[in-house]
Amino acid sequence: MAIDIAEIKRLKDLTGVGLTDAKRALEEAAGDFDKALAAMRKKGLTKAEKRGEREARAGVIGSYSHDGRIGVVVEVNCETDFVAKTEEFKALVKDLCLHIAASEPADTAELLEQPFVKDPAQTVADYVKDHVARLGENIVVRRFSRLALGEL
C-alpha cells in the first residue's frame, strides 16, 4: 500500500518523530492516520515513562501577565540546559503559564490532572509527556505561583 507523503509529513510534524518512524506507523495502521497517531502517542508515552525516573535539574522559569491583572510564574525542569534553550521547550513553558492563568489550579497535582486549555482532549500531564517524547528528556513542572489583582 502506498502511503501519501503529505500524511507522513503531517504525522511527523504532530509527533516529532523521524520520517521513517512516521511512515512505518502509517504502514502498520494500513494508512489510517488516527490509528497511526494513537500508536505513536502510545509509543511516545512509554518512552516518556522510562525517562520519568531520570533527574531533571536544568530548566527555565517562565512568566506571564494577563493585562496586568493576573500574573503567573512557573518553574519547569528538564535534564540539560541544551533542551531548556530550545524553542519547543520555551513554547511548552509559555503554554503552561497561559493554562495556569486561565485555569487557576491549586497545586501541581491538580494542574497535571486538568484538561489542557488548548486541547481539552488531553490533560496537561499528557501534553508534558508529549514533549518528553519529542525532546527525549524528562520534564517536570516543579512549582508555580498565580496571583490575581485583589487576591490575597
Image (tube, rainbow, N blue to C red):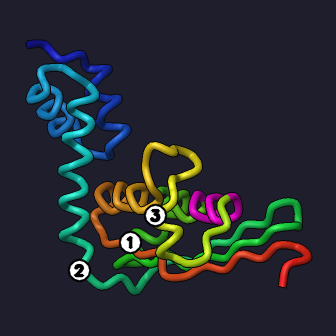
- Mark 2 is surrounded, within 10 Å at the Cα level, by few (under 14), some (14 to 19) or many (20 or more) other residues, namely few
Q: Amino acid at mark 1?
A: Ile
Residue drawn where x is 71% and y is 75% of the image? 146
Q: Secondary structure at mark 3?
A: helix
**Magenta segment, which residues?**
95-102
For discs 2 and 3, the disc positioned in front in the rendered view: 3
Magenta part, dominant SS: helix
**Image side of residue 62 versus residue 40, left or right:** right
Q: Say whether disc 2 or disc 1 marks the residue closer to the N-terminus.
A: 2
Q: Quadrant of the C terminus?
A: bottom right
Q: Is residue 141 magenta?
A: no
Residue drawn where x is 23% and y is 80% of the image? 53
Q: Secondary structure at mark 2?
A: loop
- Residue 139 - label: 1
Residue at the spot of label 3: 113
Mark 2 and mark 3: Cα distance apart in space = 20 Å
**Image side of residue 113 versus residue 80, left or right:** right
Residue at the spot of label 2: 53
Residue drawn where x is 51% and y is 45% of the image? 120
